[in-house]
Image: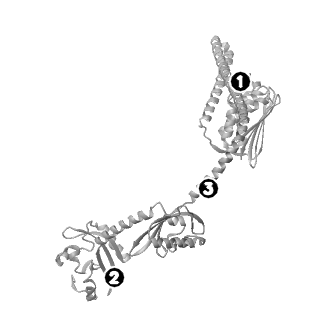
């Protein structure tokens, strides 16, 4: 039976009869010793050997590969075969003369009389591969023409059954491919038009020529689900295997119909517009008058802005000149006090210098804060903190600037914990309380309050000072603005603007109530 090592104890004659005339190379191996027990005569044209003995000497279980397997991979393949019972792969084999062919290797395990064997088959798939590739290319050409056409296409046989449809057609009629190819053309047309369609179909079948449909007439098609829509169809005829077929190119003209309807409507609207033009002309003079009034108001606002700029120049000149003059005069006077007994006088002027420098620093800090705000460089850092304790701490830092007999009364209600930017809260409170002290007389009381409720956090600062004129209230939070009754009090006009921006950054609101000579109340609210 073409045995290599002698007959083995299974039905050799059956194996020979099965493999002798096979186009495949077939071999049987001892699974344990990996010893070749049998192979058929196909080895000669598969591997180019004319001598069986030479073939046996050179052939190995996973051999004759163009790309040899290393031992680790070969062991992995063998363990997979033993575990799963089979192995299939495509392999490039090298014949004795050096030619290469593509083969499919199938290895299957079987047990006979208690022993394990491998059945090895090699099939030459070069021809099959070339044929498949050529067929695949032709199919792809057809698919490219059919599927990627810009129009929906239906292929219909002589009975009117749809036998093929491209993706555009299935999308247009909203049918899956399997379902649309089970329909007839009549299924895609409303019942009331079937008689008309059958007449066109019979006429087309008689003449067997290509002709456009829908030109000058409206055809109606039917989507899956029953929705009707207008179409234009071009039909073509061809023969295949002596059978006539019709190819239908379908155009959805819904948008065209809507455009035509829109144009007609626009024509009517244009006529109405012409009628309205006269009324618009009549309204024009009124509009011009309104615009003139708006322009006058804009010019008024421009004058107000110019006035604000003038105030800023005047303020900046005064606020910088005064401390600088103080510093200069104090330095000059200190130089004259050379006697050690005049140290008190020198200390007095040193304090004046420190105060002036502090004022300048405050002014510059306000300008720096404004710059950061306008450049969007203020970074928020929300933290949980005890609002009552922090406000008490901030107020204790402000006590040294109180005027004679002035006092601060602080009251807190509700919960204690707040989640806000503590640094911004500190700047806000220092500004508002400092203003209250500055604009209130000696012996007055500044009242500070805080309340943390279920939904909001409220902070108030109330003074007994000059109050704010009503006409100044709307400008109060603008840059560089100072009230008419505060021109002789030190300040840059930036503080309240910065306060309002800090409150806005924390998504809060600030409001003010004031009465001349009776004081001012600032109220700040944040979401709890």
Q: Find residue 29 and report its horizontal and vertical position in percent.
A: 27, 79
User: On screen, 403 above or below 340?
Assistant: below
Quadrant showing the N terminus: bottom left
Q: Which of label 2 and label 3 is nearer to you?
A: 3
- Give the spatial CA distance, label 2 vs label 3: 77 Å
Q: Element type at marker 1?
A: loop
For the question of whether residue 349 can be seen, the reply is: yes
User: On screen, 39 above or below 276?
Assistant: below
Q: How many marks?
A: 3
Q: How is the image coloured?
A: one colour
Seen at 59% across and 66% down, the residue is 228
User: On screen, 46 above or below 347?
Assistant: below
For this view, does 207 lie left or right of residue 361? left
Do tag 2 and tag 1 residues touch (Cβ < 8 Å)?
A: no
For this view, does 26 lie left or right of residue 237? left
Residue wearing tag 2: 110
Disc number placed over residue 261 in the picture, else none: 3
- Give the spatial CA distance, label 3 vs label 1: 73 Å
Seen at 47% across and 73% down, the residue is 205
Q: Element type at marker 3?
A: helix
Sort mark 1 into few (<14), some (14-19) or many (20+) by Cα contacts within 10 Å: some
Disc number placed over residue 490 in the picture, else none: 1
* First along the sequence among labels 3 and 1: 3
Q: Find residue 85 and report its horizontal and vertical position in percent.
A: 36, 78
Sort mark 3 into few (<14), some (14-19) or many (20+) by Cα contacts within 10 Å: few
Q: Element type at marker 2?
A: strand
For the question of whether residue 31 can be seen, the reply is: no
């Amino acid at each position: 039976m073409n045995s290599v090592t002698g007959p083995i104890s299974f039905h050799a004659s059956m194996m020979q009869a099965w493999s002798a005339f096979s186009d495949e190379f077939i071999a049987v191996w001892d699974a344990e010793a990996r010893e070749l027990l049998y192979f058929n005569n196909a080895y000669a044209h598969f591997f180019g050997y004319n001598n069986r003995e030479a073939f046996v000497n050179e052939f190995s279980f996973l051999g004759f590969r163009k790309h040899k397997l290393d031992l680790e991979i070969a062991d992995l393949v063998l363990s997979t075969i033993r575990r799963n019972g089979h192995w299939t792969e495509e392999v490039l084999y090298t014949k004795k003369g050096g030619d290469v062919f593509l083969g499919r290797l199938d290895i299957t395990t079987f047990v006979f009389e208690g022993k394990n064997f491998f059945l090895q088959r090699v099939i030459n798939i070069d021809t099959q591969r070339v044929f498949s590739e050529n067929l695949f290319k032709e199919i792809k050409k057809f698919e490219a023409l059919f599927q990627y056409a810009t129009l929906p296409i239906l292929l219909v046989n002589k009975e009117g059954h749809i036998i093929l449809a491209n993706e555009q057609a299935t999308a247009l009629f909203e049918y899956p491919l399997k379902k649309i190819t089970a329909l007839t053309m009549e299924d895609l047309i409303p019942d009331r038009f079937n008689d008309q369609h059958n007449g066109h179909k019979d006429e087309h079948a008689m003449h067997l020529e290509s002709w456009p449909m829908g030109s000058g007439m409206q055809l109606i098609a039917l989507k899956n689900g029953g929705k009707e829509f207008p179409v234009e169809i071009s039909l073509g005829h061809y023969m295949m295997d002596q059978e006539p077929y019709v190819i239908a190119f379908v155009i959805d003209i819904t948008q065209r119909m809507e455009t035509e309807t829109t144009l007609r409507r626009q024509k009517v609207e244009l006529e109405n517009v012409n009628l309205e033009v006269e009324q618009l002309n009549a309204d024009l003079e009124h509009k011009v008058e309104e615009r003139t009034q708006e322009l006058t108001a804009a010019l008024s606002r421009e004058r107000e802005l110019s006035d604000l700029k003038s105030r800023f120049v005047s303020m900046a000149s005064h606020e910088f000149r005064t401390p600088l003059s103080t510093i200069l005069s104090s330095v000059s006077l200190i130089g004259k006090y050379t006697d050690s007994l005049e140290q008190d006088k020198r200390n007095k002027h040193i304090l004046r210098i420190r105060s002036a420098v502090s004022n300048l620093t405050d002014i510059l800090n306000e300008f720096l804060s404004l710059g950061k705000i306008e450049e969007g460089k203020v970074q928020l850092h929300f933290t949980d903190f005890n609002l009552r304790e922090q406000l008490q701490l901030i107020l204790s830092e402000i006590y040294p600037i109180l005027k004679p007999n002035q006092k601060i009364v602080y009251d807190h209600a509700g919960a204690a914990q707040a989640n806000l930017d503590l640094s911004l809260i500190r700047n806000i409170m220092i500004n508002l309380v400092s203003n209250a002290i500055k604009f209130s007389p000696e012996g007055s009381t500044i009242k500070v309050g805080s309340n943390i409720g279920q939904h909001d956090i409220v902070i108030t600062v109330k003074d007994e000072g000059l109050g704010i004129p009503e006409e100044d209230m709307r400008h109060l939070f603008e840059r560089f603005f100072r009230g008419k009754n505060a021109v002789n009090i030190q300040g840059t006009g930036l503080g309240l603007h910065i306060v309002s921006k800090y409150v806005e950054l924390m998504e809060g609101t600030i409001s003010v109530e004031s009465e001349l000579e009776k004081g001012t109340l600032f109220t700040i609210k944040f979401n709890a």
